[in-house]
Amino acid sequence: MSVINTPNGYTLDNGGQRVVVDPVTRIEGHMRCEVNLDKNNVIVNAVSTGTMWRGLEVILRGRDPRDAWAFVERICGVCTGCHALASCRAVEDALDIKIPLNAHLIREMMAKTLQVHDHVVHFYHLHALDWVNPVNALKANPKATSGLQNIVSPKHAKSSPGYFKDIQTRIRKFIESGQLGPFKNGYWDNPAYKLSPEADLMAVAHYLEALDLQKEFVKLHTIFGGKNPHPNYLVGGVPCAINMDGDMAAGAPLNMERLNFVKSRIDEMVQFNNNVYVPDVIAIASFYKGQLWGGGIGAKSVMDYGAYPKVNYDKSTDQLPGGVILNDNWDEVFPVDPKDPEQVQEFVTHSWYKYPDETKGLHPWDGITEPNYELGSKTKGTRTDIKELDESAKYSWIKSPRWRGHAVEVGPLSRYVLAIAQGHEYITEQTTKALSGFNALAGTELNMKQALQSTIGRTLARALESEYCAEMMVEDWHALIKNIKSGDSSTANMEKWDPKTWPKNAKGVGTVAAPRGANAHWIVIKDGKIDNYQCIVPTTWNGSPRDPEGNIGAFEASLMGTPVERANEPVEILRTLHSFDPCLACSTHIMSEEGEELINVKVR
Amino acid sequence: MPNIELTRSVDKSPTESFYDVMRRQGISRRSFIKYCSLTATALGLGPSFVGKIAYAMENKPRIPVLWLHGLECTCCSESFIRSAHPLAKDVILSMISLDYDDTIMAAAGQQAEAIIDETIEKYDGNFILAVEGNTPLNQDGMSCIIAGKPFHHQIEKVAKHCKAIISWGSCASWGCVQAARPNPTQATPTHKLITDKPIIKVPGCPPIAEVMTGVITYMVTFDKMPTLDRQGRPKMFYSQRIHDKCYRRPHFDAGQFVEEFDDENAKKGYCLYKVGCKGPTTYNACSTIRWNEGTSFPIQAGHGCIGCSEDGFWDKGSFYDRLTEVHGFGIEADADEIGFAVAGATGAVIAVHAAASALKSAKTNQAENTGE
């Protein structure tokens, strides 16, 4: 038992009851979480562990840089495409390849479609069951549900009592079958669920609507990239050539019909965000109005590289501006440079890797990774049957990235705080409007900081970002048409396709606003092959274990101070962890200068 | 591969329900009703639900599916929910009972893991194990930890009691990206770990959504395993190459090729063979069923096939290298006859064909130009 004060302002007490959640479900990949509860069932210590490692960057070494996008795309099939894009950008940065405007606009639409898709699927299919109780929906009055729908979002067409009655009947039949499928062993009689039966029924209906519609959104990827998940990308541009009215246009990747198809999907995304997703989040949040915990370092210490430039290669035109804010001081935004060796560094003191000197961090271009799975002396259980981890030693497959030594949170909330702090008109207005909608429903008078520095704030920012991305896409589509109309049909710059045109040594960085936050890939190319490849992805930042100074990362910080209704049912822990939309396959895959040595790791 | 009826086994009645199973295990009707009552209470439902739950349990259940995740990227689950016919919600609500799938299940931690034990107890030998991802053996198996233990403990335990296994995607089927050289975690596909159960491989990174739900609906509808080829893939979806039914195939035959991305030929939709298309050696349904409700497929969108449903496709050279190891180009040969890629001679054949076609095309152009 010990009490520790962290440099970033938390008091960690590992006495009291220890609660273990493993696996943390409804996330991408595998994760474990342990917390200590005090006598009032309030979380006083949190330990977050990435429980998988795949070694993708090791695998990339020695390969053709033009192939890298396909490998790293497989880091994650949920945020599919965001790593492929970061990879193409890293290679293009290293080789000084500039892509055509059409390719830029197409990539922007693909990235923003991913934002909308991923945010919608996250909220309805990974996060909603933390707030919504499907069993309670059986008690709803369908007519009253219809009334509620008309208050929450009068523009949504699917709102008749008959519609809700049908949904309720289907859920009733499902539950009465006794085979509960994904709802089995849920926490349905836990008082932590606060929605009225009608709100539950409305949310369940939208769970199913979102499931049907998300498959439509991604068809934009299918048009531009041939498939989803894992659409195809291309170093130098995009693979989909444009042929509007020439010979054989009908068989070309992009023609009038294909672009019209894309526009229809964009319109669907705009509508769903405006009429369903954003109103739902505001309505559901209003039932949880008193719950202002879960913020942690969120909206206080935040980082993003900036994204969606109006003019490609001009960071000053980013429609989601980047930067760093520290210690809740929104008045000062530091510039961020992923190439500066002093800024972004990774530590492994508490990670299952080995550095020659573990008190120091390494910039990704100089990154080292050697797996070193070992547990601390205070671990309960055995090496292959862990009961309780020893967080004073190594305890995660995730490294600890820090910005100038500071733990920062990344994600939609961080991007929104950065935008608001920098006077972004659209986002300030959009957030203010959402907040007044919430205050009106909840009967509260929360200001921006109060509302955003919470689990609910994180979830709300994600919905707003989805809405903004869909609207930016409408502009991208019109810009693409305008550019084609001006006579430019080019989609790829092939001048440096041939490795013979490359310098002997080159280094590059590619950044992307991934759905879960700041994503960057660093590449070193030597003699036409990959010499080193490193990714620091959003969940590495958020899910990081402690650093040598003892700073806790965003996941751990966010859980501190959260009251728990029932110690053996982790609803509140899941709720806050899910508000980050953790992606564990993303967060754990590193490569080193000594990458080859890994081949010699024990082979059975 | 023997054909196995899925919802029954030799020693049990064809319509054995959950109630029958309980009775066979010597549990009284009284205890059974009590169980139903507890279920209703656990759900916060009133006593009126007890009879309904009991009724359902006395009748033929939906087949339980435990969907485990090893080292993977979740693209298979994402693909699955893209299914348009049937809709993913209809599969989950009406066809199977997806009792464990850590990507979408409400329960976590001990409540999640308890489902595995409950399923084994109630449906021993009568549920399907679906595997997404694969099993690492290096680092003591601890590069994939579930409930504090190596993933291989979980998969081995579940496999021992299941009726059949579906290996979703290239990870579970072959190894896929984390098993690419040098395979630092020693990621191991299902069939190399579990050798005593029928396994259906549904490869692809990911597999096509409608192929995934097609395999499930076939099994539920016809109550048996689909016919598999020698490599364990359902013949219905994996018995021909992308090239065989590609809409750009006439351009291949005519020797009309994209020479470089975004050239004039790319705009005309010519064949992508010269920019690395692996369609001629890849067995999958992309050119027939296509992707995302038939919207398109990689070749139609201008990029060559990268061969993502083939064993070891990550280690067969660059995605942009021209294929040199190609079998002939008749569509009659099936996967069993081809097996793994055939080296040398056939590579020459395709190269000669491409050259001959190009020559033919050049001659035609010349003829046109000179007015012959």
Image (cartoon, rainbow, N blue to C red):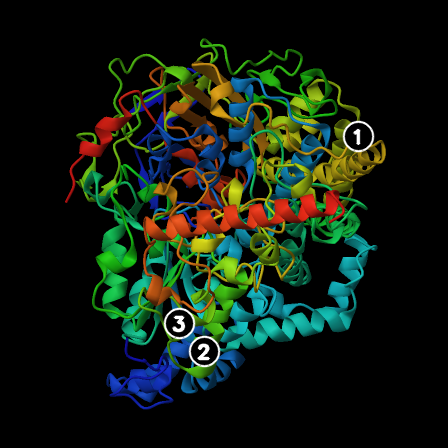
**In the picture shown, does residue A1 fall above or below A316?**
below
Quadrant showing the C terminus of chain A: top left
Disc 3/disc 2 C-alpha distance (Å): 11 Å
Callout 3: SS: strand
- Res B265 quadrant in image: top right
Residue A10 image point, x, y percent: 43, 22
Answer whether residue A453 is visible to the viewer in this image.
Answer: yes
Disc 3/disc 1 C-alpha distance (Å): 49 Å
Q: Residues within 10 Å of mark 1 (few under 14, many from 20)?
A: few
Of labels 3 and 2, earlier in sequence is 3
Callout 1: SS: helix
Report in which chain the residue with disc 1 lies.
Answer: A
Q: Are marks 1 and 2 on the same chain?
A: no
Quadrant showing the N terminus of chain A: top left
| In this rendering, position of residue B283 left or right of residue A17 | right
Q: Which mark is residue B64?
A: 3
Residue B86 image point, x, y percent: 58, 70
Comparing labels 3 and 2, the label whose residue is closer to the camera: 2
Residue under label 2: B220
Q: Looking at this view, is A81 or A175 the one in front?
A: A81
Q: Residue at x 30, y 49 (%)?
A: B147
Callout 2: SS: helix
Comparing labels 3 and 1, the label whose residue is closer to the camera: 3
Q: Looking at this view, is A205 or B8 the one in front?
A: B8
**In the picture shown, does residue A30 fall above or below B51?**
above
Asked if marks 3 and 1 touch (Cβ < 8 Å), the reply is no
- Res A18 quadrant in image: top left
* Amino acid type, residue under disc 1 in the picture: Glu
Q: Which mark is residue A429?
A: 1
| In this rendering, position of residue B244 left or right of residue A38 | right
Q: Residue at x 69, y 43 (%)?
A: B267
* Amino acid type, residue under disc 3 in the picture: Pro
